[in-house]
Image (spheres, rainbow, N blue to C red):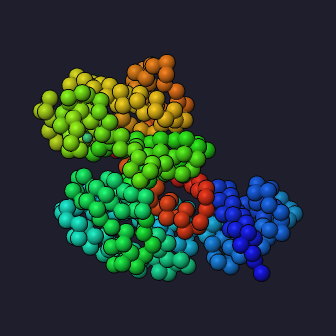
Amino acid sequence: MITGDAAYIKKLNRSLILSQIIEYNKISRADLSKVTGLNKATISVQVSDLLEEQLLIEEQYEHNNLGRRPILLSLNRKAGYALGIDLDKDQILFTLSDLLGFPTHIEIVPLQTKDYNEIVDILVEYIIEIKKKCQGSTFGLIGVTVGIHGLVSKDEKILFFPHLKWRNKNIKSDLVNKADVTVFIENNANLTAFAENVFKHNKSSNLISISMHSGIGLGMMMNGEIHKGFHGYAGEIGHMIVVPDGNNCACGNQGCWELYASESSFFKQLEENYQRTNADYYDIHTWLKMGKPDVVEQMEQLIKYISIGLNNIINMYNPEIIVLNSELLRLSPNAITQIERRLNSNINHYSKLLISELGKQACVMGACALSIKKFLQISELNLQITMNRTL
Ligand SMILES: [Zn+2]
């Protein structure tokens, strides 16, 4: 008979073993025993269970030397699939990944409506279609995580989605009822920070990620967990006031940071100040390379306001790693150097400031990773993926 304590320890050991197999990609039972500190008998029993569940596969390592060839264990990455959804104001980005977070299918659906029920129907239709496609695998579609560009409570309800003007929506319950799948709802900036931690900076116990696209959102990873605050709304840093009596913001205040330091504010000001309409990232990249004075000037303004906000955030959190998620900064030569030049207060302390390599994929990648983590019931998830980024 397994007592409560024994069952708990068994679960902890399973979590540790799975985490290490994923981190090492391929590992023998003997090495697994060394890295986990668990004895060989425990490893043997647990691995046998995981093989039976079809969560692991084993293969004989091929090498030219004579002697015994070790059997290596790895996660059966095709045993199930996770669906990540980034629900933004004018488009929905869907990404399906295998159990190691590798994207197997990506699709962008433009949004022509703001109506809640219509958008739920679009999501349900897509989820059901994907669910059917995954039916051939052992576990099928293991979970759907939706990233929301707004306030999401700890019990996964939408309190406010500013761009779509949704208030108090229980989208989790609606999706579960209509599509009959496991669903998680999370703020987009939180998923972005989670992705940075899982895919890029897994040794960091203190990471913040700032998404600077249509608005500005902050995600904080503390000891492998998303820091959410009391209700779940922490990180609404885009509405920190940086200009007293500044521009009017939809939140009801004036002079909010995202009105001066987000990508949408940059494009808006380029249009208002210099009549450069409908510019895209490619245009900005070209103009910056050509040294167009107005674009360079506007970029300097952006960097000035980014630095003001960053100064405040650094003083508040003393982060180890700060990841800025912005295509504009990625396209601007020496952006990090220029920002760091402005962070010259003796009070500022952090270890690394860098631009995200995951870019706009970060939210959906974090969404897939969250479903995977919950499905495997592991406390630590370190995945590796190489991004081939183009403009
Ligand atoms: Zn505001």
Q: Report the residue at 32% width, 25% height from top.
A: 304
Viewer-proximal residue among 211 and 291 = 211
Q: Report the residue at 50% width, 59% height from top.
A: 369
Quadrant in which the C terminus is drawn: top left
Note whether 326 is above or below 10 in the view shown.
above
Q: Is residue 379 visible?
A: yes
Viewer-proximal residue among 220 and 253 = 253
Q: Report the residue at 78% width, 67% height from top.
A: 43
User: Where is residue 314 shown, x and y percent of the image?
Assistant: 46, 31
Q: Is residue 356 visible?
A: no
Residue 256 placement: quadrant: top left
User: Where is residue 56 shown, x and y percent of the image?
Assistant: 66, 71
Residue extending farthest right: 67
Viewer-proximal residue among 297 and 309 = 309
Q: Is 55 left or right of 232, judged from the image as shown?
A: right
Q: Is 17 left or right of 67, judged from the image as shown?
A: left
Q: Report the residue at 58% width, 47% height from top.
A: 223
User: Where is residue 204 shown, x and y percent of the image?
Assistant: 58, 42
Residue extending farthest front: 230
Q: Is 363 left or right of 53, judged from the image as shown?
A: left
User: Where is residue 156 shown, x and y percent of the image?
Assistant: 40, 62
Quadrant in which the N terminus is drawn: bottom right
Note whether 182 is above or below 202 in the view shown.
below
Residue 203 placement: quadrant: top right
